[in-house]
Image (cartoon, rainbow, N blue to C red):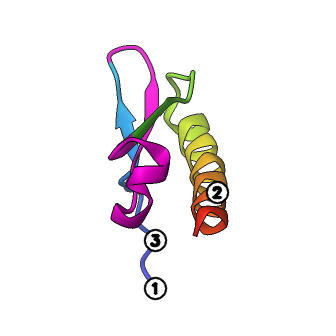
Amino acid sequence: MKISAKSPSYLVRNPYSYCLRMNVPRDLQRFVGKRELRYSLKTGYLGVAKLKARLTAGHVQSIFRLLR
């Protein structure tokens, strides 16, 4: 099994830091009021950003499950 060094698809680089960017599922957009969520990870270091992005994405996914 090959391990990929790529960043998660929801991790986006801003000029000064990294940001989490996730699409809101279509069936939940009316509850959330947005089509996309953006959240600053408040770090410029890729390793730290990957960790924070994974944790935050997990929390967002659990909120999506609760909304459903």
Q: Which residues are magenta?
A: 15-36
Q: CA distance from mark 2 to mark 1?
A: 32 Å
Q: Residues within 10 Å of mark 3 (few under 14, many from 20)?
A: few
Numbered marks: total: 3
- Please state which of the two labelled residues, at mark 2 or mark 1, is closer to the viewer: 2
Q: Secondary structure at mark 3?
A: loop
Residue drawn at 32 percent across, 47 percent down? 35
| Residue where numbered disc 3 is placed | 3
Q: Which residue is mark 2?
A: 63
**Left of 23 or right of it: where is 58?**
right
The answer to whether mark 1 and mark 3 are in CB contact below 8 A is yes
Amino acid at the residue labelled 3: Ile
Q: Which residue is mark 1?
A: 1
Nearest to viewer (mark 3 / mark 2): 2
The amino acid marked with disc number 2 is Ile
- Residue 48, x across and y down, in percent: 61, 36
Which labelled disc corresponds to residue 31? none
Element type at marker 2? helix
Q: Is residue 14 magenta?
A: no
**Residue placed at 35% from the left, 54% from the top?**
9
Q: Position of residue 54 (x, y in %)?
A: 59, 52
Decide which of tag 2 and tag 1 comes sooner along the chain.
1
Asked if one can make out residue 7 in the rendered structure from this viewpoint, the answer is: no
